[in-house]
Image: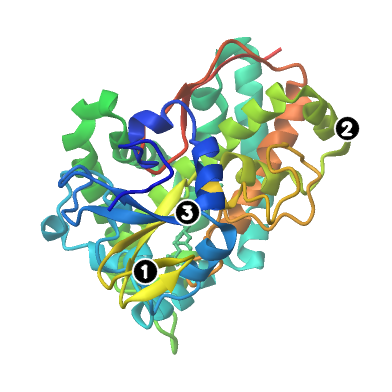
């Protein structure tokens, strides 16, 4: 069985393919002619031995899969949070503690607890501290004159946001940042040397977070960690659960927002009329258009729990299903001129934060706030920022990333 409408061997999760940009033209062909299409994979290429997966490319079908966890499970074989090939589930027995890999009712319980940290009030409370951070990051970059936008500007705010949110003391932040960056670097073969370090860093980050949880259990404080691990009369996270939650935050909330920022800047600078418009009007709608345009998470996976028909395809129980947010976000049935970067686009029902099911991005509002703050700071302090050449893209099966982007700050 192979996809009849695509060249032999085409696989949208091929890291080499994504190193040259998300394959949007091929997705358009799939949406029109084979919206749920079998993509064969040679045994072992993806860590699976089931011969391939179904690629789901239409907006409506991605939503359908995302909102039916009883048919499309996140549990079995959800390769997505294999932070690192050397992290075996048995090594830290963690897959089942990672919320992205859970189904209801376990997921519902965990999600209802961690949501306490992400209320509009909790996110609002971070606004001043994060604005201050964003301004400092941008001012430091301006002084350099030229540099790599990813390391100078896009990298730091997402980490600071997570650190602020869970109250990590300033003195510990540099080691947390080091662990997190080492951990997420594995996706790129050029960074292969760091694989063992990635494993080590994940374990150290979790141990650190578990230590925080233990402290708050013994000695409650007025902070978010206490709310999650020691709220009297309500459900609480165990120390292990808290450790894995921080690990998920470090992966889910870090590189995604960094890549949205870098792609967003690239889009602004390659669409100068939009950058002019942004500087003049600072529209609230820009953050969502940046996330639609960038789609930092290209795809996630589910596994069918039963035989099911979707988009004309007969999916069998146990088969993998890849939901392609990058394709859904360019679906002509939903978006007027999806190929246009339009910071005033409204409504903008993109699926960059997920297809609306139980796993919908917990940090969506935090990410919007971060994007808003950093672009405002850039527009104020470096209105004449320019690209110095083409960005260097990440090779990854599922992340749409920019590794380096040289710019002139003023
Ligand atoms: C889940 C995207 C920022 C925390 C997800 C999902 C996507 C996503 C696609 C999976 C949705 C699904 O399976 O239905 C993004 C993008 C971001 C971003 C594009 C930035 C532009 C953040 C931030 C945080 C965060 C800043 C927190 C600091 C999470 C968590 C989950 C998640 C905890 C798992 C939720 C669950 O399983 O219930 N995100 N995310 N994300 N995200 Fe984000």
Of residue 122 and residue 154, the one placed in the foreground of this image is 154
Whether residue 34 is visible:
yes
Whichever of labels 2 and 1 marks the residue nearer the N terminus, that label is 2
Q: Is residue 374 left or right of residue 243?
A: right
Residue 379 x/y as whole percent? 76, 28
At x 49%, y 44%, the residue is 256
In this view, 149 is above or below 307: above
| Structural distance between the alpha carbons of marks 2 and 1 | 51 Å
Label 1, on which residue? 314
Badge 1, how many Cα within 10 Å: few under 14, some, many 20+?
few
Task: Give the quarter of the figure containing the C terminus.
Answer: top right
Residue 125 x/y as whole percent? 65, 58
Residue 48 x/y as whole percent? 19, 53
Of residue 346 and residue 192, the one placed in the foreground of this image is 346
Residue lying farthest bottom? Answer: 233
Label 3, on which residue? 34
Label 2, on which residue? 280
Is the residue under label 1 in contact with that under label 2 (CB below 8 Å)? no
């Amino acid at each position: 069985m192979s996809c009849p409408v695509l060249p032999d061997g085409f696989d949208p999760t091929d890291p080499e393919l994504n190193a040259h940009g998300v394959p949007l033209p091929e997705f358009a062909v799939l949406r029109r002619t084979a919206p749920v299409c079998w993509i064969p994979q040679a045994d072992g290429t993806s860590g699976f031995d089931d011969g391939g997966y179904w690629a789901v490319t239409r907006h409506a079908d991605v939503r359908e899969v995302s909102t039916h966890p009883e048919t499309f499970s996140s549990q079995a074989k959800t390769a997505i949070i294999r932070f690192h090939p050397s992290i075996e589930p048995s090594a830290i027995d963690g897959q089942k503690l990672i919320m992205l890999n859970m189904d209801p009712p376990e997921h519902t319980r965990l999600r209802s607890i961690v949501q306490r940290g992400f209320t509009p009030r909790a996110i609002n409370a971070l606004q001043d501290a994060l604005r201050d951070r964003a301004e400092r990051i941008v001012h430091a970059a301006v002084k350099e004159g030229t540099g790599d936008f990813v390391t100078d500007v896009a990298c730091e705010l997402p980490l600071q946001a997570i650190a602020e949110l869970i109250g990590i003391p300033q003195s510990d932040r540099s080691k947390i940042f080091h662990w997190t960056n080492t951990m997420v670097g594995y996706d790129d073969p050029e960074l292969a040397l760091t694989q063992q370090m990635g494993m080590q860093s994940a374990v150290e980050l979790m141990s650190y977070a578990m230590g925080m949880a233990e402290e708050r259990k013994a000695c409650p404080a007025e902070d978010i960690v206490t709310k999650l691990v020691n709220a009297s009369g309500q459900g609480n996270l165990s120390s292990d659960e808290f450790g894995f939650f921080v690990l998920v935050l470090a992966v889910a909330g870090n590189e995604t927002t960094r890549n949205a920022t870098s792609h967003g800047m690239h889009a602004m600078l390659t669409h100068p009329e939009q950058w002019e418009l942004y500087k003049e009007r600072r529209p609230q709608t820009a953050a969502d258009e940046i996330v639609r345009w960038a789609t930092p998470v290209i795809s996630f996976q589910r596994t069918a729990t039963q035989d099911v028909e979707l988009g004309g395809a007969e999916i069998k129980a146990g088969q993998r299903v890849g939901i392609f947010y990058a394709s859904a976000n360019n679906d002509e049935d939903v978006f007027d001129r999806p190929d246009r970067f339009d910071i005033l686009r409204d409504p903008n029902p993109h699926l960059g934060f997920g297809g609306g099911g139980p796993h919908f991005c917990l940090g969506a509002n935090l990410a919007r706030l971060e994007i808003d703050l950093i672009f405002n700071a850039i527009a104020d302090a470096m209105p004449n920022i320019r690209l110095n050449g083409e960005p260097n893209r990440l090779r990854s099966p599922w992340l749409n990333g920019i590794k380096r982007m040289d710019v002139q700050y003023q």
